[in-house]
Image (cartoon, helix red, strand yellow):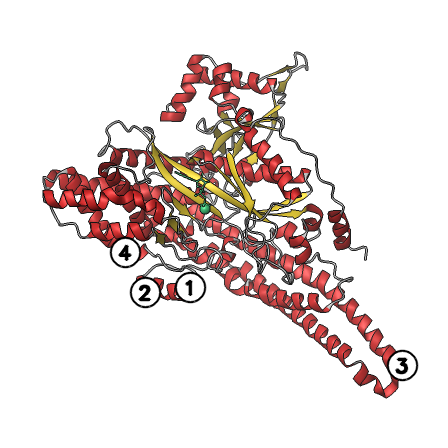
Amino acid sequence: MSSIRFQALREASNRKLIDFQESGRKSELFGSNVFNDKAMKQYLTSDAFKAVQGAVQFGTKIDRKLADYIAMGMKEWALNKGVTHYTHWFQPLTGTTAEKHDAFFETSYDGSDPLEKFGGAQLVQQEPDASSFPHGGIRNTFEARGYTAWDPTSPAFIFGTTLCIPTIFISYTGEALDNKIPLLRALSAMDEAATEICKYFDKNVKKVTATLGWEQEYFLIDKSLANSRPDLIMTGRTLLGHTSAKGQQLDDHYFGSIPTRALTYMRDLEQECILLGIPVKTRHNEVAPNQFEFAPIFEEANLAVDHNCLLMDVMQKVAERHDFKVLFHEKPFKGVNGSGKHNNWSLSTDTGVNLLSPSKTPMTNLQFLTFFINTIKAVNDYEALLRASIATASNDHRLGANEAPPAIISVFIGGQLTKVLAELEGVSTGKLSPEEKTDLKLNVVGKIPDVLLDNTDRNRTSPFAFTGNKFEFRAVGSSANCSNAMTTLNTIVAKQLKDFKNEVDVLIESKDMKKDDAIFNVLREYIKQSKKILFEGDGYSEAWQNEAAKRGLSNFKTTPEALKARASKQAVELFGEMGIMNQVELHARYEIELEEYTKKIQIEGRVLGDISKNHVIPIAIKYQNTLIENVKGLKNIFGSEFESIAKEQIILIKEISGHIEGINSKVEEMTEERKKANTLTDAQAMAEAYCNNVKPYFEIIRNHCDKLELLVDNELWTLTKYRELLLTK
Ligand code: ADP
Ligand code: MG
């Protein structure tokens, strides 16, 4: 009775609401803890301010002298806000963020002259002891050390009493050791390629920015209850647990009234976000009990990725104050919906145009169609790479699980735009007659604004859907760093735009075509070539699985299968040509992702073996002993009659023995499979062995445990149950 479960339940039911009050208007507080333009204007000389602006907008280098001035201003600003430490804040290939705090405080060698110091050198570059970060062989190959370097495009911020400076993490030989460098390179490739295309339509465009608005789903579980489950603590998900009688079947949670305790947490979190300049906007209940979502106003993609990483960290920290634990895992609970992180993506120009937004004039709509069709073509040609960019052990639970997009990548565009594409497909080859052009402009291209109405009827089963003025990449996992998906998406579209430009220019120059004619001609061919990726139907259906196979679309249900695309010739050529990752960098990521997969499954296997043998079996035996005592007692009282009186108890005793045997033998077999897998040296083979030979035992073992949970006296069961985890508010 004094088990951790009952203690946790007592704690959870005695929670007092934390008193929280917003400390002012969001618009006034916004970015108070960010070294943004406003702070820079106040603390920097105009030269220093201009240097940062140049670096942000055009990537110009900041010289050492100015870096010293910038550091000085940054330090003053931070000290005035009570900050004591600074850190380079970066995103190693662990998928999370990393930081090492140094105090501003310094003394002379003899301990005299204490003061706060921070110069350009500390701002611009640091060398963390990087040997323990995953590098996929990069650092061995080159015997190179790694360093972090300031990324001025993402402003420094204060969290707690620490000044955090977003940085890249790179080896001395120039290989990216993090998630940010490939993303920055992809965004810059996108800027270059898209700006060139924009010039067909508007000579004034000088820069194109990729925008990202993520929607973060998560579970909020009482801290004591979550901590009472070793599987949640160690793997982020429940490896066993019988489904609760009441789950999400009444649809009473989605968009429901937010429970007070959760709402107080959200308000507190929002306040932190606002101070940090994260423009959070939307909060609501999600489908599963205790599942919620947070979404911001979209931002430039690099900043948005940083903000999402920061948010995930801050969410966990604020949760501590409210005695919650946040679960970011894609599938923490069997039988209820998992969590995703839709990545809403678009492109916008420095002249203020959203390139994926249909507008009023035929000319700007031709620009819209150009970007729209090129994106579809890119996804068509690189669907396997896009699938690989979201492949993780935890996301495997979600993709194709009939609640989230399938593992097949396809594009949904809605009825209106499907019609527009069909019309464009009929455009004549070669130069267009004036009549045809007028007709196109009036009746096809000119009519697109209506599309916005059409897309209110959205297809929620599509992994990549056009939603009126942006694409929504829905297959991204809730625990993921968005940079992987964003790097891949921006790279493939940039490559596609580059090819498009070449093809259009060839038609203009060699075939003496007008610009519009050339664009229509190339787009027509793209529409023909991209048919297989367009799908408007039910992505969850069996029929789509068959149809997709016929179309030749990939359908990688597991991470080891999906990741192969990362090592493909196509990937090497693409990322190489676009200058995003060389072969070494690409291969390193492939290896790291495979290893991460293997380790995750390995840990889950160990934890499951441990819990089932050390928790479940002893409980089952305890209960079985009670039954045995009971049967013995009945025999004492009733003599030979006991068999009919104790019939049910005897059946139970046998059933329990059956499950105990099942757990024991299956855990043993699973352990043998782990041992075999561990002898493999090839990362791909090892991941496959874990996936195909170890993982299948999880469900079998779980099944025995979950059956026992139903049989055993509730008072004896030490593992906090689903109904308690999910329905405690
Ligand atoms: P939902 O898809 O849940 O219905 P919305 O359509 O309101 O919600 O938008 C979801 C997200 O899309 C928000 O985070 C929003 O900031 C983002 N978003 C809107 N426009 C753009 C854009 N042009 N680029 C990137 N993200 C965008
Ligand atoms: Mg959405």
Q: CA distance from mark 3 to mark 4?
A: 78 Å
Please, what is the three-letter code of the amino acid marked with disc 2? Lys
Classify 38 as above or below 349: above
Relative to 561, residue 27 above or below? above
Residue carrying label 4: 531
Dot 3 amino acid type? Asn
Residue type at the position of mark 1: Ser
**Gap between marks 1 and 3 measured at Cα:** 59 Å
The secondary structure type at the circle numbered 4 is: helix
Tag 2 residue: 550
Residue position marked by numbered label 3 in the rendering? 636
* Of the image marks 4 and 1, the number of the one nearer the N terminus: 4
Q: What residue is drawn where x is 32% and y is 37%?
A: 355
Mark 1 element type:
loop
Measured in 3D between alpha carbons, the distance from the residue under mark 2 to the one under mark 1, in whole angstroms, is 15 Å
Among the two numbered marks 3 and 4 on one chain, the one whose residue lies closer to the N terminus: 4
Name the residue tied to disc 1.
Answer: 541
Q: CA distance from mark 2 to mark 3?
A: 69 Å
Secondary structure at badge 3 equals: helix
